[in-house]
Every structure is written in C-alpha cells, then in structure tokens.
Amino acid sequence: FSVDSSRIDTRREIVDFPLGVAGLMAAEAAYPERVVRAPLSPADAALGLTVGRVVSLDLGMINAGGTVVEAVDFDLDWTVQTTASGEFRIYGAATWQPTFRRRAQEGVVWVERVGYADGPLEWRGNAGLQWTKGPLTIDLNLQYFDSYRVAPAGLDPLAISIGAQRQRYQGARRIPSQVYVDLAAWRRFEIH
C-alpha cells in the first residue's frame, strides 16, 4: 500500500493577455511596452492632449498566469498464495484531487476547476479482485468516477451562460458519480 501526495505551484505561466483593449488602455502605465504611441504632434498639443496617438497595441501572450494543483494518490496491490484455492490478488488505485485552481494574472481571483466540466474530478479510481488457479484467471474490477457540475468553472458571463444552457440540456446541475463493473475470465492453453 502506498500514498503519494503532490503539490505543484506554477507562476508566470504563459496566458492570453487578460485585459483586452479597454483594459490595456486603462492600465497603460503598467504595460508601457505594449502601447506604442506616435510623438505628440503640435496639433494634438494645441487640443490639450498630453500623449501622441496610439500606433499599435500588443495583446499577445503574457507571463502572468498561475496554477496550483494538489493531489493524493493511493495504490494497493496485495497477493495471497494458497495451496488449495489458488492465488488471490486485491488491487486498487485512487486519486483525490482537492485543488486545481488557475488565475490569469496576479491579483485576480483564483478559479477552482475541480468538479466542473472543464476540470478534473475530485475522486476517481479503480479496485479489483483477481483469482488465479492453474491456467484459469477471473478478474472483477470496479471503476469509480466522481460527480461533477455540467458548467465550466468561473464566474465570467460566458461560463455562466454555457452552464445555464448545459443545465437545460442535461436537466440537472450535476452529472452523478458513476461506477462501472467489469468481469473478465481467461484461460491459458499449452500447445505441445
């Protein structure tokens, strides 16, 4: 049996420029290399303007995003050998992911994606029991997938609109958790 825990904290990820044209113009002092202006002409100065006209705007990618991911992985593999009844193997693996949050830039709200349609499930895993005696093996396996919201993560108007539409199509806010059961049997044959 093993338990592994991990935390990944990424900063200055490459993301789309988060402010758009209006936001860039409002925050021009914070991004002087992204706004290129012509020199102030005498005609513009006579009109009371203090800066030249905009020649170009750079709305390209920026190193401003961040992601935090936390996960705990569980793994079990145990085999018992008997002389009369054969070999029994119990196995399983599960992942608990309580955190997968992102933000477009420093100072803005983190968006948690766990449990949403565009993020990972909080819990997922599989477990099984396998029996082998001689050339015969029978395996019973269960797979578990946690429930999740049909909406994408986030509070922006597009995410809210998409979420409302998906909820109308689905008839519910969440997809329920699911368990799949597989039963397999196989036999080895020796050819002489």
Image (cartoon, grey):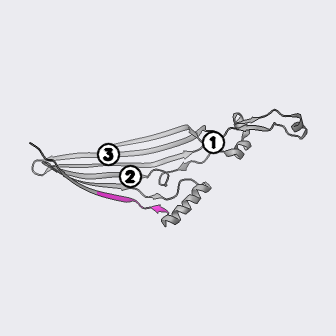
Provide the residue span drawn in magenta: 172-181
Viewer-closest of 22 and 129: 22
The reply, left or right, for residue 35 in relation to residue 130 is right
The reply, left or right, for residue 106 in relation to residue 125 is right
In the displayed orientation, state which residue is furthest to the front. 192
Residue 36 part of the magenta segment: no
Name the N-terminal-most of marks 1 and 3. Answer: 1
Q: Amino acid at mark 1?
A: Phe
The residue lying at 72 percent from left, 46 percent from top is: 22
The residue lying at 10 percent from left, 47 percent from top is: 83
Q: Amino acid at mark 2?
A: Arg
Name the N-terminal-most of marks 2 and 3. Answer: 3
- Residue 188 in percent (x, y) is at 15, 47
The residue lying at 50 percent from left, 63 percent from top is: 173
Name the N-terminal-most of marks 2 and 1. Answer: 1
Q: Secondary structure at mark 3?
A: strand
Residue bearing the label numbered 2: 124
